[in-house]
Image: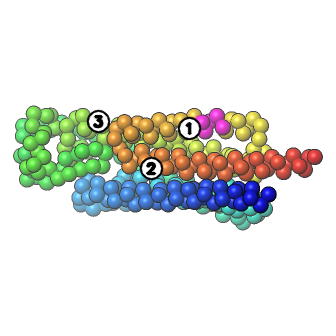
Amino acid sequence: MATSLDSVNYRVWIFNIIKYLVYGYLCYNGLQFYADETAAGATTFQNGLSLASIIEVYSATIDTTFWIMLVVLLELETYIIDDEVLHKASVKWSLMGARGVCYGMIVWAWYGYIVKFLFQADIDPMSVADACTLVSQNFSLLLGLEEYVRLDNSNCSTLAGQELFRLGGHNIVAPLADLEYARNVAMIDIFNSSSWIGVVIILEVDLWYQLKGAYTGRIYWISYVIKAILYSILIGCALAWGYTGVWLDISDAALWLFAFFFIELNLFQWHEETEEEAQQQAA
């Protein structure tokens, strides 16, 4: 019996180590997003950032930061804090308030993805016979979504014979195919963010019913089906990032899916424990 108990404790320990390593790596990805977006912002907003443009530049950083905070709150509610404590009004409303702040910032980041997409879609043709004539005018060359390099004598020659387009009225140029690529990646961001918002809305409903002891039967299976659809869309977004070669986004997407696998598993175990307790009381 002791051996069996030790084995269970060992598996739980390994499970928690993996879970918290995933959470830690998500924090590291957030720092990478911040570095990338800071570099991109220095190109697109050379005269400095306004308050309104912060969400356009740092949408992924803000999104990641508050998703991490939300995962921590969900971890507390679905795994760490006892049911008796969760039923206390002060604890319940404090957690709901904190999650509400996270949801507000996540929706703001979702708006930022839309603004970023509209920025990528705002292109105008340039009547330039030779891209090298722009080198002295402080232009940058777009390589991908939020990826820019200074236009110089070494890379302007690669644009020979190609029609150039200017991005959003800024000193950023690229061939049409590259601009369409960046716009399509920005569209994936919108689908991904929208689907994640859908997931946490369903999770909020799950938590509400679980605390009431009513997370069972039809409600349980409807939630299961809706989340299966949403997670399928998220997997599709990850595959789309892989197809377009955006490796930071695909690794981040895989980690978030892994992180929410733990949250879903916590919720499932909580549901099973509640069901078992209800059956014992009925017996």
Place of residue 235 in the rendered image (x, y in percent of width and height, measured from the top left)? 49, 38
Q: Nearer the viewer, mark 1 or mark 2?
A: 2
Amino acid at pointer 2: Asp
Drawn side of residue 128 relative to residue 256, left or right:
left
Tell me which segment is drawn in magenta.
Answer: 224-228
| Camera-nearest residue between 77 and 13 | 13
Name the N-terminal-most of marks 1 and 2: 1
Q: What's the magenta bit mostly, secondary-structure-wise?
A: helix
Report the side of 164 relative to 98 (left or right). Answer: left
Q: Quadrant of residue 183?
A: top left
Q: Write the residue at 29% across / 36% down.
A: 180
Q: 7 or 21: which is nearer to us?
A: 7
Question: Which residue sits at x=34%, y=41%?
Answer: 245
Looking at the image, residue 261 lies above or below residue 68: above
- Amino acid type, label 1: Leu
User: Comparing marks 3 and 1, which lies closer to the viewer?
Assistant: 1
Give the label on residue 230, or none. Answer: 1
Q: Looking at the image, can residue 92 be seen?
A: no
Q: Do residues under tags 3 and 1 come within 8 Å of each other at their CB atoms?
A: no
Q: Secondary structure at mark 1?
A: helix
Mark 2 falls on what kind of element?
A: helix
Q: Amino acid at mark 3?
A: Glu
Residue sitting at 57 percent across and 49 percent down? Answer: 260
Q: Which residue is mark 2?
A: 252
Q: Nearest the camera: 198 or 21? A: 21
**Disc 3 from disc 2: Cα separation:** 23 Å
Q: Residue furthest right?
A: 283
In this orientation, does residue 130 appear?
A: yes
Give the residue number, with chain letter if any, for mark 3. 180
